[in-house]
Image (cartoon, rainbow, N blue to C red):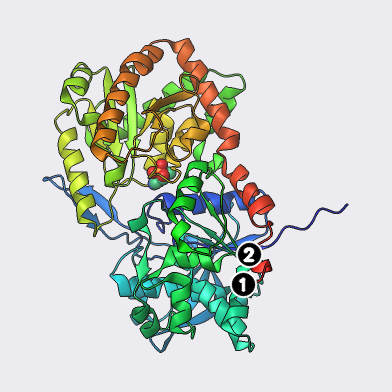
Amino acid sequence: MQPEPLPSVAYFCMEYGLHEELPIYAGGLGVLAGDYIKSAGDLRLPLVAIGLLWRGGYSHQHIGPDGLPLDSDDARELAHLLKPTLKEVSVPIEGREIRCQIWQVDRYGNAPLYLLEPIQENDRWMARRLYGGGERERVFQEMLLGIGGVRALAALGVAPDIYHFNEGHAVFAGLELIAQEMAKGRDFETAWGEVRSRIVFTTHTPVEAGNESHPIDLLLAVGAGRGVRREDLVRLGGDPFNMTVAGLRLAGRANAVSDLHGVTAREMWRHAGEIAPILAITNGVHPGTWQDPRIRLALHGGDLWDVHGDLKDELLREVARRTGVTLRQDALLIGFARRAAGYKRGDLILRDPSRIEPWLKTGAVQLLFAGKCHPQDEAGRRLVQSLVQAVRRYPKSAVFLEDYDLRLGRLLTRGCDVWLNNPRRPMEASGTSGMKAAMNGVLNVSVLDGWWPEGCKHGVNGWQIGDGRNETDLHAADERDMRSLYEVIEKEVLPAFGDRVAWTRMMRASIEMAQWSFSSHRMVRDYFYTLYRVPTMGQMAVG
Ligand SMILES: *Cc1c(COP(=O)(O)O)cnc(C)c1O
């Protein structure tokens, strides 16, 4: 029997984290998308990716004397990273045609990535800074990505079987596809049913407020509705128009990004009525990008401990270069790098001075923090400030590293001894930095949230903190997880760290756990061989 050919896929995402030299990503979503298209490239899967060219990047974030973040533009020369396609598209926004050129990026072993950029100098502001501007600009950006993306594919002669929207930013592509069907004389109902069979949607946000929505009036005023009537737009996304709900209703199949997130997402969107079934495909990370080649070699016959020592040295040298602080090579080094968001509880380990101070003052434990917040997120800015201020109390053993990016991410997830992750369960959809760490034998100490319930063997390849329950009383949950964190460090991590044989055995178990199960190769195969191929709601009758 001939195997069925794989469907061809167009992957849409607002950001791509391929390399630090191409700063068109903000954080986890973009890094995931970058890893996704690298694995699709490695495995030669039929996929092209669509995004926007953010000339101004995201943000460089340094810390001022008061501990508050100071943001600056990323104005690098990008020309040598981009290939012109000599194709262009135009996107009608507020009654004007915004002409965009299409660049190609293919230098990272990735499946072809096409980036749109407005051509006219006075249109460029629309897509200069990733996640910059107010709501109206955001809608323009999403129109460029969604509507422009569908048109770019046509201009490039690509006719995909599947349109994969990675998060809600691309849902206007679904409206564009509906508009194309309606232009052939179909009614809305039929057009919707038709496009559903071609759309796949991935949700990443288990926090209701984190799911973007826009007033229907705004969408109608700027032309994002693509001629779909108001009442039909409301049927898709509600009013205000929720981009995630619309994604789930436009898609014939959908997924969450870990098993636990699948449970959370199905519960969260139960009230959304008729939506695509939400499966779970756990994220993964690109081994060629994230696993140090020396670790891979040592796994099959070298000394993992020695290699780890070299990687730790490299990190400590960079810390010294950036901050002037010389950390100890022989003392436990705990890393924590996250976007500043309250639920991630970056300061949890610092909350009880009576527990953490003795370790930090004797130097038995050392802490490395990194992370940015969105420049316009006031609460996030305050979180960074309070973390920086707390860290400054222990200048010899705790460090905050500024301007977290892919390069720093690589150094940290190779060179720390332990990787700490303590979100309020179940608010971390997946998390991927812990997978990078695990792949390098950096042992996870983590709440059983996101991917970790699938990977954790307590005491064998890392450690769990907390008891794996969802707690509605936030104060109680914080208290419980904090106590558990100190207990695990004191009774399990520090003793294991003192035993080189035991530690090396755990490193090996960690690497073996991560390098297959949490590789982006496994992830893209799951998408291609299951999600992209399962029968869809769109193949049943709609309405
Ligand atoms: C991997 C990575 C992330 C995402 O990691 P999380 O564990 O999801 O926070 C964010 N930023 C950078 C620079 C990364 O390398």
Q: Residues within 10 Å of mark 1 (few under 14, many from 20)?
A: some
Question: Which residue is pictured at 34% across the width and 75% down the height?
Answer: 215
Is 234 positioned to the left or the right of 89 in the image? left
Residue position marked by numbered label 1 in the rendering: 542
For the residue labelled by badge 2, is the local secondary structure a helix, a strand or a loop?
A: helix
Is 398 positioned to the left or the right of 484 in the image? left
Ligand 1 rendered quadrant: top left
Q: Position of residue 315 (x, y in %)?
A: 36, 31
Tally the numbered discs.
Answer: 2
Q: Nearer the viewer, residue 92 or 228?
A: 228
Question: Which residue is pictured at 34% across the width and 39% down the height?
Answer: 423
Q: Position of residue 20 (x, y in %)?
A: 41, 50
Mark 2 vs 1: CB contact within 8 A? yes
Residue position marked by numbered label 2 in the rendering: 537
As drawn, 477 above or below 194: above
As drawn, 106 above or below 398: below
Q: Position of residue 261 (x, y in %)?
A: 47, 46
Give the position of the C terminus as an image quadrant: bottom right
Can residue 17 be seen in the rendering of this structure?
no
For the residue labelled by badge 1, is the local secondary structure a helix, a strand or a loop?
A: loop
How far apart marks 2 and 1 lie (CA) works out to 8 Å
Identify the image quadrant of residue 476.
Answer: top left
